[in-house]
Amino acid sequence: MVSAPSGSGKTTLVRALLLENLPLSFSISATSREPRGDEVNGVDYHFLSTIEFKNLIKQEAFIEYEEVYPNKFYGSLKTEVERNWKSGKHVIFDIDVIGALNIKKKYPNQTLSIFIIPPSINVLEERLRSRGTDSETALLERIQKANEEIKFSEKFDKSIINDDLEKSKKQIIKVVKDFIDS
């Protein structure tokens, strides 16, 4: 599982892992938020309405879910995880901090949790602003949440400071290879 505050480079690093010749399969998360930029339903996320998401919660369709922002849910569908396990591959999650810790709690010996740390909150804010996908209110909400999420980094198996993207890619690939080979 790879987790980090929004804008830390988590998705970029997960994509780098998936380009490696490793037995990994990506678990597409579900969310009740609207797509940003060029995100595609069923590829980047399973985009659901808040009502659809809440109905799936009632049906116990998630191995984990979290209301990350008010009425903005994220979760890992059991069907996604089962699909990936059936392929005989390790499941890789690009997941929020609480969701990652919940999965780690359920599967402590089968999971590797990696936390991506931004070089600083100022750099994180610059990255989020450069996306141009959030309102000022949403941006400030993300920065505040990032400050809280960073406090959880010590609960993860490994942490990587993403201050140099190429170096961070090499680090995450090594950490995952070592886990798979162990």
Image (spheres, rainbow, N blue to C red):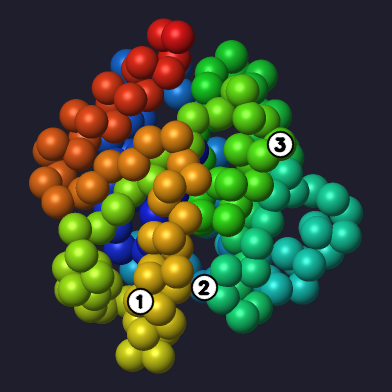
Q: Nearer the viewer, residue 50 or 73?
A: 73
Residue placed farthest to the right in the image?
A: 59
Determine if residue 45 is in view.
no
For residue 77, which quarter of the picture? top right
- From the viewer's perspective, is residue 110 above or below residue 39? above
Q: Position of residue 146 (x, y in %)?
A: 39, 68
In this rendering, position of residue 162 left or right of residue 35: left
| Residue of label 1 | 143
For residue 56, which quarter of the picture? bottom right
> The disc labelled 3 sits on which kind of residue?
Lys
| Residue of label 2 | 34
- From the viewer's perspective, is residue 148 above or below residue 74? below
Query: How far apart are the alpha carbons under marks 2 and 3?
Result: 29 Å
Q: Earlier in the sequence, mark 3 or mark 1?
A: 3
| Residue of label 3 | 106
Q: Position of residue 44 (x, y in %)?
A: 46, 51
In this rendering, position of residue 132 left or right of residue 52: left
Q: Earlier in the sequence, mark 2 or mark 1?
A: 2
The secondary structure type at the circle numbered 2 is: loop
In this rendering, position of residue 29 left or right of residue 143: right
The secondary structure type at the circle numbered 3 is: helix
Category of crowding for the residue at label 3, using alpha-carbon neighbours closer than 10 angstroms: few (below 14), some (14–19), many (at least 20) = few
Determine if residue 29 is in view.
yes
> The disc labelled 2 sits on which kind of residue?
Glu
Query: How far apart are the alpha carbons under marks 2 and 1?
Result: 19 Å
| CB contact under 8 Å: marks 2 and 1 | no
Category of crowding for the residue at label 1, using alpha-carbon neighbours closer than 10 angstroms: few (below 14), some (14–19), many (at least 20) = some
Q: Position of residue 116 (x, y in %)?
A: 33, 48
